[in-house]
Image (tube, rainbow, N blue to C red):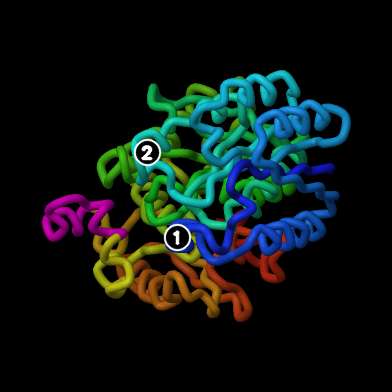
Amino acid sequence: MRILVLNGPNLNLLGGRAPEVYGSATLDDVVEQCHARSTRLGHRLDTLQSNHEGELIEAIHAARETADGIVFNPGAFSHTSYALHDAIEAADVPTVEIHISNVREREPWRRISVTEPACVHQIFGRGVAGYLDAISHLHYRRAHPPLTLSYGPHPDQVADLRLPDAPGPHPVAVLVHGGGWADPYTRDLMDGAAVDLTRRGTATWNVEYRRVPPVGGWRDSMADVSAAVGALSPISDDHRLDLERVTVIGHSAGAQLGFFAARTASVRPVGFVSLAGMLDLENTGSGFDDLISAFLGDDRRAHLAKVDPIKALPGGFSTVAVHGRRDRSVPPDQSHRFVEASLAAGDPSRLVELADADHMDVISPLAAGWEAVARACLAG
């Protein structure tokens, strides 16, 4: 691919401008990291920063002939420039809009983007990593374009279906992304896993769900993932899905959601795979207090038992818990305790430990330990 990274007004001041909001990385740092990610994925990268709307429009127009995808941080233009919206739409080059800060938690005027509807995806609130995630999203979108289907009326009640080349019927891997149930983290995190597992002969159903804030919370998020699994039933005939071979795979906080979806969905899976999962919420440590409190709402103590996987055993299905020993986000002992408790409750359960994997390696086909992760997911 030929990827163009566009940066709008004031982004030349990164590193000095409001570092408490935008971080300490300079624009040169951002460009260097983007080049590294593109090179790793085998793509060519061009970059441009401009404080002038017209120059950005001209660059988008030119991209019709020079780029296969655009990563665009429009800055404040995203809230005002219908001209940029029209340029993105007219150019018809897949464009991912990104914002370094969490624009939905800042001034009200920043929460509305007039350019986002013309883009294929929006990423915000992940810092500089948002640029890298946008490049990866374009890569996997091109490698195997998804069919995005709704399973409910809310914009977040959608999932990406990818089908193998074989005629089927296909086993199905339901993928549930993590990110602490929080708004900035979306199903693009599971793009790589979805594409790789589909290439290995499994249909993938990469689920989005309502997150916190402004909606979400344990009732909404858990109901959504359960509904998404159940939504496989009405589409199974058209897409040759084998509902007797469904596995739910959840990463991080998505493992908590995936476990309960496996117990409650109208389509019952044969297995559950946790990838660096949060499976023992009462014993996550103080570093997770804010995330869990936001997820549970006001009365944390009353709700915790309803949403804690380890307290809901037995699940009634087999479990594989995959965890990297270098995980500094979710401690590996979460998986250790859960597998021990699963076995004690009578559920078939096993632990797969990866010596050199961190929290994100378990969802990256580029990571050294991915082959073991893929085997666990397909055998789950």
Residue position for label 1: 252
Which of these two is toward me, 269 or 137?
A: 137
Q: Is 175 covered by the magenta stretch? A: no
Neighbours of disc 1 within 10 Å: few (<14), some (14-19), many (20+): many
Q: Residue at x 54, y 23 (%)?
A: 235
In the image, which disc is placed on residue 210?
A: 2
Tell me if 14 is positioned left or right of 278 in this view.
right
Q: Name the secondary structure under disc 2.
A: loop
Q: Quadrant of residue 368?
A: bottom right
Q: Which residues are magenta?
A: 291-306
Q: Residue at x 20, y 58 (%)?
A: 304
Q: Residue at x 16, y 57 (%)?
A: 300
Q: Is 297 covered by the magenta stretch? A: yes
Q: Name the secondary structure under disc 1.
A: loop
Quick one: label 1 or label 2, which is nearer the N terminus?
Answer: 2
Q: Pick the quarter of the image with the N terminus.
A: top right
Instruction: Identify which amino acid the numbered label 2 is placed on.
Output: Arg
Q: Is the stretch drawn in magenta largely helix, strand or loop?
A: helix
